Image (tube, rainbow, N blue to C red):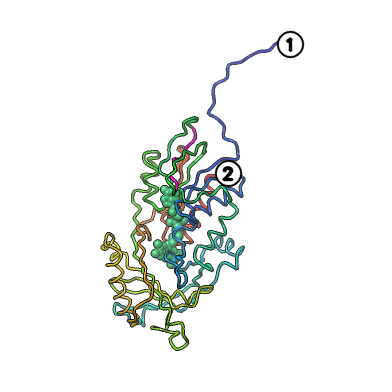
Amino acid sequence: MSLRTSAKRSRPPKRSSSQHFAIVGAGIAGVACARTLVQAGHRVTVFEWNAQPGGRMVSDATPFGSFDSGAQYFTVRDPRFKRVLQTTPELCRPWSANAVRVLDAHGRLAEAALPQLEPHFVSQPGMNALVAHWAKPLGDSLLTGVQVTQIERDALDATRWQLRTEADDGAVHVHSGFDAVLLATPPNPARRLLGEHSPQLKEQLAPVKVSPCWTLMIAFPNATQPTLAHLGPQWNAARSTHHRVAWLARESSKPGRQMVERWTLQASADWSQEHLHDDAPRVEAKLLRAFAEITGIRAEPAYAQTRCWPEAQTMVPAGKPHLWDAKARIGAAGDWCTGHRVEEAFLSGLSLALAVH
Ligand SMILES: Cc1cc2nc3c(=O)[nH]c(=O)nc-3n(C[C@H](O)[C@H](O)[C@H](O)COP(=O)(O)OP(=O)(O)OC[C@H]3O[C@@H](n4cnc5c(N)ncnc54)[C@H](O)[C@@H]3O)c2cc1C
């Protein structure tokens, strides 16, 4: 018997069916994507800058109760989103759907303009509860308090990716060996991290525009006494055409929340853009004046806090459910792919996972 050697042409390295994905961002898009990939037998490492998953679905804790400072509620239009929510019914509650009002510029009810309303849902006890629950099975694969500062080709294997990160305590790390990188952040961090790695994604991201949002959170703890229980208007949520204010909601009216009278007010996109670089006390004073004009509540709140979201709402979406460059093996997902809502972010994360799988 003779042993023969034959010259074989070198082939590109074959990827095993189970791959290791780096996912940047643990908002609902990143977590939906990560869960789907894990369920399909892949390995993921999810990097999240904040201390908790949830992204713009967040509840800020205060001594007077929590405020949903980002997303106020979500809609459920797509059967895939509905099916997933049905697995955790205890976390998802309908919220005063038919009480949302439309106000004119002076805070008066715009009689003719009441829209056809669809059910509105909140997660309880806070808006972050849903994503936090879905993220639990990720265990140690979810790294929080870690900002991804750069993505680059793996130093040991140029077919793979490595990520540079900086932790809250300033510790810098390089995480290597990823078969693909999936960016589940708002568009600007995605653009920064993408750099020149994928001209295709860069081009698809270029037209996407998002607007900022200044948010004011105020509490009136004395109003919990029975006589003052309904301080101000008899509605719980309203869209407004006041030049400063787009949305107001009584946080205490949401299911599973504390009873202290609390309001969240979101400034309009134009006003937020115009005042993006103002300091917080100045914004607070202006939004408080607008709140008094609209609701008639002129009492001094015991608690007031503002928060600025530099990338709150999509104005121009990418127009595709997800972005994926199969050659570079980089993808992107988020609400901005098709819209500006929680549900769209979920569907985008799901769509990216199915595409890369
Ligand atoms: C004020 C406001 C009001 C809203 N109201 C509603 C509403 O009523 N109804 C509705 O449906 N939607 C609403 N939205 C939109 C909704 O919140 C979003 O559509 C949805 O939460 C987006 O999810 P996402 O996963 O795409 O992104 P995000 O939730 O933004 O998640 C992205 C994550 O990426 C992380 N990240 C970013 N850069 C890095 C990095 N370099 N390294 C590591 N991590 C990083 C961020 O910390 C964040 O956690 C509102 C948003 C805001 C801000």
Q: Quadrant of residue 50?
A: bottom left
Q: Quadrant of residue 215?
A: bottom left
Q: Which residues are magenta?
A: 159-167
Residue behind mark 2: 43
Task: Give coordinates of residue 3: x percent, y percent.
Answer: 68, 12
Q: Nearer the viewer, residue 289 or 195?
A: 289
Q: Is residue 98 above or below residue 165?
A: below
Q: Given the image, on which type of amino acid does mark 1 rest?
A: Met
Task: Give coordinates of residue 150: x percent, y percent.
Answer: 41, 41
Q: Residue at x 32, y 64 (%)?
A: 269
Q: Is residue 244 above or below residue 139?
A: below
Of marks 1 and 2, which one's residue comes earlier in the chain?
1
Q: Given the image, on which type of amino acid does mark 2 rest?
A: Arg
Disc on res. 1: 1
Q: Quadrant of the C terminus?
A: top right
Q: CA distance from mark 1 to mark 2?
A: 44 Å
Q: Is residue 160 above or below residue 281?
A: above
Q: Nearer the viewer, residue 116 or 21?
A: 21
Task: Give coordinates of residue 107: x percent, y percent.
Answer: 32, 80
- Is 282 magenta? The answer is no
Q: Residue at x 51, y 69 (%)?
A: 122
Task: Give coordinates of residue 291: x percent, y percent.
Answer: 33, 76
Binning the other alpha carbons within 10 Å of mark 2 as few (below 14), some (14 to 19) or many (20 upward) gives some
